[in-house]
C-alpha cells in the first residue's frame, strides 16, 4: 500500500479502513468484505468531507450533501431508495447508519441495530445532532427533546422518565458508550440511560472530563488538594457528585487515599477512583482497602530491595520463584510482591558480626 497523505478524516469497520485525503479523495484498504474494496463506487468518491462506518460498511458524506455507501448491504452498504439528499451530518452504530437532513432523519441497515426508525419518525424533525451506541441511536431536537430508537438493551429505551429531560434547559451535549447514552445540559443537569455498567463510564467521563479545564487549572493532568476543596465547594459540582451517588466528603477522602504525599494526584487516578466509588454508600471503603494494599505492596517491595542490597535475602531460582508465585496467587490474590523473590519463602542468611 502506498503512503496516504493529507488525511482529514479516518474511520474503520471491523476489518477495513477508509481515509479522506486532499480534495476529498477517499482511500480504502483492508478486508474487501468489510468495506476495504471501494472500487465499485470509486468514481463517486470525490469531494468527500466525512466518512463513518458500521461493522462491515462505510458511508461517505460529500460537500453537496449527497451520500456514497459501500460494503455489506445488510449493514448499510447499500443506500435506501430514494437516496438521502441535503444531508447535514452522519452517525453510525455497529449495524446501521443515520443521516440528518433538512426534512428529518433517514436510517438504513440492520433494523434491530437502529436501521429502522419508523416508530419515532414523526418525532424526528428539527434534529440538530445524532449519536450512536453499538445498536441504537439518540437524536437531539432543536427544542431540546431527546429521541431514541434501536435495541432497548443498548440505550434505545431512552431516559427512565420523560420528566427527567427538561426542555427548558435548552441545548444538551450527547455522548454514547457501547451500550448507553448520557446527556448534559448547559445548566448542569446530567442524565444517563442504557446498560448500568456502560452508563457509569459515560456518566463519569461527562461529569469529570468535560470539566477537566476547570478542575485542572495547570493543564498538566494534576489536581492539588487546595484546588479540589474549591471545586467541591461549588454547588454545581456537588450536584454532579450526587448524580454519581458520591458524597462530597468521600471526594476529599478519595484524594487523601490516592495522594502519595506530594499533595496532588493525577486526574486519571481521580476519575478511576470516582468510578470505583460510584454505587453503595460505603464503596469508598473498598477504594480505601485497594489503596492500602497498593501502598503495602510498594513498601514490601522497597523492603525486599533494601534487604537484598544488605545481603540479608537471597533470590531463589527462577523455577522455585515461579512455583512460589503460583502458590501465592492461590492463597493471596490481592497483590503480588517482588517478581523474583517471595517474602514468605525467602532464605535469610545470617551475617557474621
Image (cartoon, grey):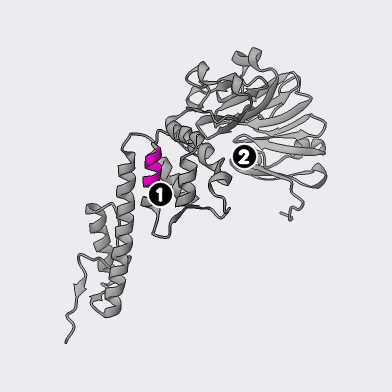
Q: How far apart are the two marked residues, 1 and 2, measured between alpha carbons?
A: 40 Å
From the viewer's perspective, tell me whether residue 8 is left or right of residue 267.
Answer: right
Label drawn at residue 302: none
Q: Earlier in the sequence, mark 1 or mark 2?
A: 2
In the image, residue 120 lies at what x, y percent?
61, 15
Q: Nearer the viewer, residue 202 or 3?
A: 202
For discs 1 and 2, the disc positioned in front in the rendered view? 1
The quadrant in which residue 52 appears is top right
- Which residue is depicted at the point 70% across and 28% down? 78
Reading the image, the residue beneath label 1 is: 255
Any part of residue 318 in sight: no
Quarter residue 346 falls in: bottom left
Point out the image quarter for the C terminus.
Answer: bottom left
Q: Residues within 10 Å of mark 1 (few under 14, many from 20)?
A: many
Q: Is residue 166 visible?
A: yes
44 vs 328, left or right, is right
Indicate left or right for 7 with 200 as reference. right
What secondary structure is the magenta-colored segment mainly?
A: helix
Give the magenta range.
248-253
Element class at badge 2: loop
Looking at the image, residue 110 lies above or below residue 122: below
According to the picture, the residue beneath numbered tag 2 turns out to be 13
Rendered image quadrant of residue 63? top right
Amino acid at each position: 500500500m502506498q503512503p496516504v497523505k493529507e488525511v482529514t478524516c479516518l474511520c474503520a469497520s471491523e476489518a477495513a479502513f477508509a481515509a479522506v485525503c486532499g480534495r476529498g479523495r477517499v482511500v480504502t484498504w483492508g478486508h474487501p468484505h468489510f468495506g476495504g474494496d471501494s472500487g465499485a463506487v470509486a468514481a463517486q468518491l470525490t469531494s468527500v468531507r466525512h466518512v463513518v462506518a458500521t461493522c462491515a460498511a462505510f458511508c461517505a458524506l460529500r460537500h453537496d450533501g449527497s451520500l456514497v455507501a459501500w460494503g455489506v448491504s445488510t449493514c448499510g452498504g447499500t443506500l435506501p431508495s430514494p437516496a438521502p439528499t441535503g444531508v447535514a451530518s452522519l452517525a453510525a452504530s455497529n449495524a446501521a447508519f443515520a443521516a440528518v437532513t433538512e426534512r428529518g432523519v433517514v436510517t438504513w441497515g440492520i433494523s434491530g441495530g437502529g436501521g429502522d426508525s419508523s416508530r419515532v419518525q414523526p418525532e424526528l424533525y428539527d434534529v440538530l445532532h445524532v449519536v450512536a451506541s453499538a445498536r441504537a441511536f439518540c437524536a437531539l431536537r432543536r427544542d431540546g427533546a431527546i429521541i431514541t430508537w434501536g435495541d432497548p438493551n443498548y440505550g434505545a429505551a431512552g431516559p427512565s422518565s420523560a420528566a427527567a429531560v427538561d426542555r427548558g434547559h435548552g441545548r444538551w451535549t450527547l455522548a454514547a458508550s457501547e451500550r448507553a447514552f448520557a446527556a448534559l445540559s448547559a445548566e448542569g443537569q446530567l442524565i444517563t440511560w442504557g446498560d448500568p455498567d456502560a452508563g457509569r463510564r459515560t456518566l463519569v467521563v461527562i461529569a469529570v472530563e468535560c470539566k477537566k479545564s476547570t478542575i485542572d487549572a495547570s493543564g498538566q493532568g494534576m489536581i492539588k488538594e487546595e484546588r479540589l476543596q474549591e471545586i467541591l465547594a461549588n454547588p454545581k459540582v456537588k450536584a454532579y457528585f450526587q448524580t454519581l451517588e458520591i458524597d462530597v466528603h468521600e471526594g476529599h477522602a478519595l484524594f487523601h487515599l490516592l495522594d502519595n504525599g506530594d499533595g496532588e494526584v493525577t486526574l486519571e487516578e481521580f476519575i478511576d477512583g470516582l468510578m470505583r466509588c460510584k454505587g453503595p454508600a460505603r464503596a469508598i471503603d473498598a477504594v480505601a482497602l485497594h489503596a492500602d494494599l497498593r501502598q503495602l505492596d510498594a513498601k514490601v517491595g522497597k523492603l525486599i530491595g533494601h534487604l537484598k542490597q544488605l545481603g540479608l535475602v537471597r533470590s531463589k531460582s527462577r523455577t522455585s520463584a515461579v512455583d512460589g508465585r503460583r502458590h501465592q496467587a492461590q492463597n493471596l490474590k490481592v497483590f503480588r510482591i517482588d517478581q523474583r523473590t517471595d517474602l514468605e519463602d525467602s532464605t535469610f542468611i545470617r551475617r557474621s558480626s
